[in-house]
Amino acid sequence: MVQAPVLPRGFELPLEPRLPRIGSVDAVALEERAASLARRSIKREAKVFALELAVRMMDLTTLEGQDTPGKVAALASKAIRPDPSDLGIPSVAAICVYPNLVPAAVSRVKGSSVKVASVATAFPSGQSPLETKLDEVRWVVDHGADEVDMVIDRGAFLSGRYAKVYDEVVRVKEACGDTHLKVILEVAELGTYDNVRRASLLAMAAGADFIKTSTGKLPGAATLPVTLCMLEAIRDVREETGRMVGMKPAGGIRQAKQAVQYLVQLHETLGPEWLTPDLYRLGASSLLNDVLMQLRKEKTGAYQSPDYFTVD
Amino acid sequence: MTELERKQEYAPVPKDWTYAPAPEARDIVSLRERYGHFIGGEWVEPAETYATISPATEETLAEVGEATEAEVLAAVAAAREAFANGWSEISPAERAKYLFRIARILQERSREFAVLESLNGGKPIKESRDVDVPLAAAHFFYYAGWADKLEYAFPNRTPRPVGVAGQIIPWNFPLLMLAWKIAPALAAGNTVVLKPAETTPLSALHFCDILQQAELPPGVVNIVTGDGSTGAAIVKTDDVDKIAFTGSTEVGKAIQRELAGSGKRLTLELGGKAANIIFDDAALDQAVEGIVNGIYFNQGHVCCAGSRLLVQESIYEPVVEKLKRRLTTLRVGDPLDKNTDVGAINSKQQLDKIKELVASGEEEGAEIYQPPCRLPEKGYWFVPTVFTNVAQSYRIAQEEIFGPVLSILTFRTPEEAVEKANNTPYGLSAGVWTEKGSRILWMAERLRAGVVWANTYNRFDPSSPFGGYKESGFGREGGRHGLEPYLEFDGGDGSRG
């Protein structure tokens, strides 16, 4: 049984060793730093490195009301072999689906390196009773999901009930067992970088293996500055506790060029240790083909029509 | 999984991500073998020349003129002639037209000037591309706007041009300092003799092409190159009405002595030893970026560089840790590479000065930190350096190093921060990092510095006046204030009032 956490106002978190202070974030300077990192010029072999890494780190996602086992099967094929004409292109990290599609996804990717991630906890709003959320988590874990992407209760967070948010993450983590837990902050609803930092620290304190920007269901999903803000919180946790938490920007990343910018930011903020799918994911539904197109261009010197890349 | 999918190859995850070189193409600049002086709208063959080099490679880029007294006098005479016969009398809107033209041509040729600036001065191309050249163009645009509105800038004071301005600029921002000097002078209706720094004459010389392209009347701007003796010749010339100097405090003092009693006007923008003050409630990661920008921007060759870091003692450790980690990601090297953060030291002479001061810091007992860093073999380089355990009395806390060297001191209370920040002969700039608005205002009232930045550093805008207290000089450049030194008024303002 999880003990009820005792949190004073402003939440001094009861974890050992101590956690970083909540502190604050200067929006202007954060955005400037993110913009300056985005201006790095990544060419030739450095670009190929980044693009291949982006493929390895991708959570290929379909989260639609119209998803079917057939659609998920097609996505799984793409995930395992992104470019049938170039077997040198690695598989993506995972496919990300709704709970009902987990069994179909699991059976389709079995034997490959591709993992199955499922959203849960009343995705995308998180506005359901805790017991319902926990049942959902247990269900997807029982059906073989490797990773759970939960959403925090933004209603609770924005009304200052941090303990409720914290408690929910702790309970979900418990329900996950060994299954990896990604905690979605839905930054577009948090409103300020200060809140993003606060929610990041709260999620990590409660046991998140990954923190993730967005559900992808709202405009204004992942941005470079908001991701940088979360990376800095991750860095502070590493510094204070030694724990390495993963990061997943999701939503709005559609072009290979953006993927490279995200990886540069990761590289120069958390260092080469984080350049692995174990600690960084890119949540995207339409990014993969642009990355494949850029990779083929780097290899052949010419762009090919989008018709030469499968739409799954 | 299908049979085919089983054949999917799994290449091992590569380990190290090294950015491939991303050099900006040099061929956009056509360097001439030899440059003369630009006098009366024409190139004049110089009597003597010297070689100007690239500090990153030590290669000779071109031969440039070493102006003699006679050549300086010819330039001043051309400026006087242009002032008397036309420039001071054409309509202000016409003057604005030329300044707008110059600004636009500079924008059009911005890549060329960015490369030139990095080539001759050693600064990273990302800075010359994103800061120096756009800001220089912005200054011309800004002062073009004032040219026909001087009556509104100074109502009821009947502003008139001063005459011929002699302008001597430094090597740290060659083109930008040229813009700071020439734009307000021309907007106010003066003519100009300008001398760029000995080590960085090329952007000023190529700027003469822009003047010709803009069809600026001959003699309105004259550019002579040379070393300190050329500058001294400009200062001594009787027919110059005003001297504007940006450079070292030592030379500034000598100029002031020389001009005493001459009736010539003078503005000086000299050295600095700015305090960058970090309070415990600051946004730390952004403050660390501000520290880095404050001292490593342009290799620390910045008069307003935040070279003294004052950190509140309660956050000293995390700030120093974060700063050291950040230093390991700075990319030092080829100034023309688009990913370079810190370029070459401008000259051998400056490198020697930095080395001497850094050695003194170690001798006096400060603790040095330098990130692991491979420097190019040729050229002038210095690793970004941090000193901790620095006492207020050490030379590295007192003297201007003008290089990528930061001295860290601590304070306990806001009063102590102010006292330490002001305890310097200089007073050009300061930085304050805190999330508390009232404290920013409290500090700004007490810091004796011409510029106080809050939660940012090294931010410039043409509309904002810039200049120093105490040994950092006097007079302001930028904004409406920047026009004043180039104008005479009715009624008791200025030496000839």
Image: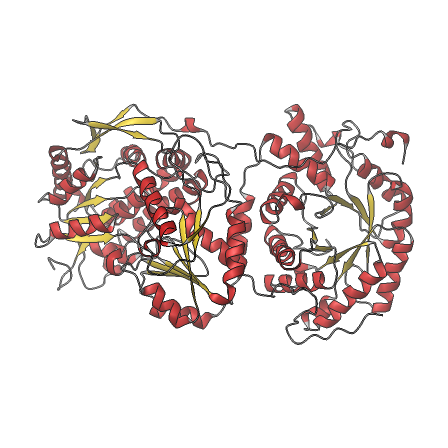
Residue displayed at 21% across by 35% down: B226
Taking depth in this image into account, of A253 and B86 the one nearest to the observer is A253
Direction from residue B452 to residue B219 in the image, left or right: left
Q: Quadrant of the C terminus of chain A?
A: top right
Q: Relative to A45, is B270 above or below?
A: below
Taking depth in this image into account, of A54 and B186 the one nearest to the observer is A54
**Residue A37: x percent and y percent?**
55, 46
Direction from residue A291 to residue B493 in the image, left or right: left
Q: In which quarter of the image is the N terminus of chain A?
A: bottom right
**Residue B181: x percent and y percent?**
26, 47
Q: Relative to A99, is B448 above or below?
A: below
Picture quadrant where residue A85 is located: top right
Residue displayed at 72% across by 47% down: A281
Taking depth in this image into account, of B168 and B205 the one nearest to the observer is B168
Q: Relative to B177, is B491 above or below?
A: below
**Residue B391: x percent and y percent?**
37, 60
Picture quadrant where residue B156 is located: bottom left
**Residue B212: x percent and y percent?**
27, 33
Residue displayed at 83% across by 62% down: A174
